Amino acid sequence: MAWRRLPLLAGAAVALAAGITGGLALLIEAMPAPASFTEHHGPLMALGFLGTLIALERAVALRRPWGYAAPALAAAGAVALAAGAEQTGRLALTAAGGWLVGVYLALLGRRRSRETFLQLGGALAWPAAGLLWLAGRPVAELTVWFAAFLVLTIAAERLELAHVVFLRPAAWAGLLAATAVVGAGAVVSLLAPAAGARTAGAGMVAVAGWLAFHDVARRTVRGSGLPRYAAVCLLAGYGWLAMAGALWSITGLASGRYLYDAALHALFLGFVMSMVFGHAPVILPAVLRVRLPYRPVLYAPLAALHAAVGLRVAGDLAAAAVVRTLGGVLAAVALLLFAGCAFALTRSGRARVAPPRGPVGAPQPPRGPRASWRPRANPGVVVGCLLTAAAVVVAVTGVSAPPTVTATGSRTVDVTLSGMRVRPAVIEAPVGTVLTLRVTNADAQRHDLRLATGERTPMLASGQSSTLRLRPLGEAVDGWCTVAGHRAAGMTLRITPTGSAAATRPDPGAGHDGHGSPAAAQPDAPARLDLAAPMSPGWTPYDAALKPAPGGTEHRVEIRADDTVVQEVAPGVRQRVWTFNGTMPGPVLRGKVGDVFTVTFVNDGSMGHGIDFHAGANAPDNPMRTIQPGERLTYRFRAEFAGAWLYHCSTMPMTQHIANGMYGAVIIDPPDLPDVGREYLLVQGELYLGEPGSQAQVAKIRQGDPDGWMFNGTAAGYDHAPLTATAGERVRIWAVAAGPGTGTALHVVGAPFDTVYAEGAYRLRAGDPGGAQVLDLAPAQGGFVELVFPEPGTYPVVDHTMHQAEAGAHGLVKVRPPQDD
């Protein structure tokens, strides 16, 4: 009977309440919430709530008691996950996905249809994600699988519910191709999460376009009542699906701090929840045998939902905390408002939905076979049992009981959470040590620390602390921040016992981070840069202060190639680089239009090198040729044009020579360039960790996948040695994008530009009515900006391609009061 399905809906309601509470707690520091709500916010919503609803609806369609195993396990898993029984919750949710696959196989046995095959493809993504989750994959890497499950299922159900069955073969082929790309993205994410997300994103855009074009909602939106309401829900949802797909196609899984969040909420909130709103008046009567009559009031939660998603995505893209928080709160209100409207409307339409009956006295159709729990070799039951068994095996083998270790001593360690890092990142202690971790969040945003052995802190606001006491140390223990995306961004901890085999055991949780990483080629290089770590003793920054052009019209310079220099390229990270005159970037040449430069180029390196000055007009055959170690040549050019010019090694492959540091700048002043208070030069380059020329490093260079970005040869160097200026003084900042593959969008936070000069021409001059916020340069381009700092303070100077800023293209300018000079 329908009332027996209420406990299953109650489990879905628990998942929804826990997911909403956890999501709000991640946005609002003062809101208390259990750690399980915040840590499992995504799985609670995607599998616990939505998975239970989908599985229940399919079980009702199957009309076999065993089919209810899927929603029952999903509801139970959601409750267990919310209650903190993580492994039990994972296991139950994974098994639920397996039984859902069995349900679709049984439905296919009744009637083979394309939409059911498509639903089966989506359902397979659920247990696949669950098995990976049980095996230790972080949720952030499973997002593409969750997306494949929901996108394929909803697309297929739209075909089924809207009866879009008379499509031409070419149209069907288009949908199958688009969904296949989404599925392929999930598979690719096993080896390359970012590439998988980009692939799936392209497929999502295609699916959204296909549905928007072929769905009957295009016609029913011009109608009235329930058909129009459902059409508005659908078409708006397709728009958010396209938005999420576009974000994933461009950014992968997360490059910027909030891009991950923007794509996820456009997909799971904007698209999926809009589908729930639109289908509820059709699905709920089928599931509970109660009417959900349409009333115009249903537009209120729908409008609130899409306004919330718009605010959330806009706040994420703009990194505006207040806006994204407002969007999160409004989304919770929209979901609760819809639930309230649905409850009220079902109460007002109390008449139960009954199956149609024939005229009185008419012969009744023959009764179908009575439902039975006996499987009778039903392939759906067999598959459900097999996938459940697989989940149990992975759960049991993936988590071994910790060995019994005798305590030999104790130690207290202060652990700090800040800058998307856990410090110290590695703790070593003798076997048997009882560690006490005093964890403090020194960051502006909320963090926590969870250990693989089960200990965890609550979610900590800025300045808050918590203490963890561990069992006697026997094996290596991993820790991480559970906030979505933070583990993937590098907030991890490794506790290693010394004096045991565990100390040398490979990290099973390293995932893809260790495959082909620069750390494998160079043991001293960390897998991720810790840009807030201190610089090494004795480190000195590259002098960014630009000296005026020397007098005279002829300049003689000697430049020596040296590929043996070891330089600090990021805080605490030293590696061999290839240089001109021993520095990265090389020496700055400066002059005026018409000046002649005579450069004696000497190869003091161990391989062939050349040099190419973009500021000169010369046939490249002779001056830019590669010379061998010990050789020299003379390169003479006249600077016919003003600008900020790049020079670099001309030897192939140029990507490797430039990426490893062989570049510099030539500054040719525009005529009548006015004097300013001070001038700086920032040459931005990409950082590829590892031994220059090694297979691992070259693979990264070819893929255009830098480990970081640098101003003047050091990632975040000017965070540790800030530039200086005086309030009210005019400052000119020259910039050159060395690449080799990316440019820059130079921006100074808090100080707009009143002068912009790029590629030999003024875009804006002081006194013009407009202003500028960014100097955008493609690889090898250059220019300058001028600005006046309005008041004393600390002003960040960044590449506003934010993932490049967060990976090192970031510095500070400390501005003093005028009287300090």
Image: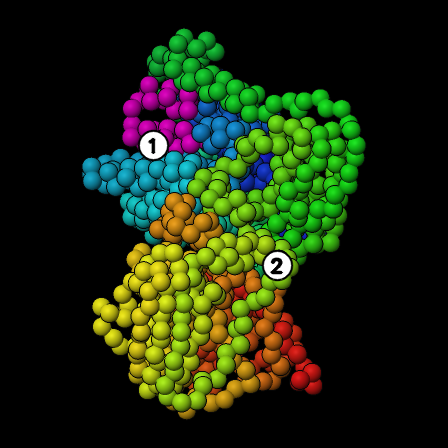
- Residue at x 62%, y 82% (from the top left corner): 727
User: What label does residue 535 carry, if any?
Assistant: 2
**Is residue 75 or residue 553 the one in the foreground?**
553
Of all residues shown, which one is farthest toward the right? 409
**Along the viewing direction, whichever of 761 and 52 lies nearer the viewer:** 761
The image quadrant of residue 144 is top left
Three-letter amino acid code at disc 2? Answer: Met
Please state if 38 lies on the left or on the right of 757 as rendered. Answer: right
Image quarter hosting the C terminus = bottom right
Q: Which mark is residue 166?
A: none
Which structural element holds mark 1?
helix
Q: Which residue is mark 1?
A: 118
Identify the residue shown where x is 64% and y is 59%. Answer: 537
Q: Is residue 123 magenta?
A: yes
In magenta, the rendered stretch is: 101-126
**CA–CA distance in space, label 1 to label 2:** 54 Å
**On screen, residue 400 above or below 818:** above
Total marks placed: 2
Mark 1: give few (<14), some (14-19) or many (20+) Cα within 10 Å.
many
Residue 604 at x, y percent in the picture: 40, 62
Q: Does residue 395 lie above or below 375 as drawn?
A: below
Left or right: where 818 falls relative to 704: right
Residue 738 at x, y percent in the picture: 40, 65
Q: Determine the residue positioned at 76% across, 24% down.
A: 406
63 within the magenta span: no
- Give the image's coloring scheme: rainbow
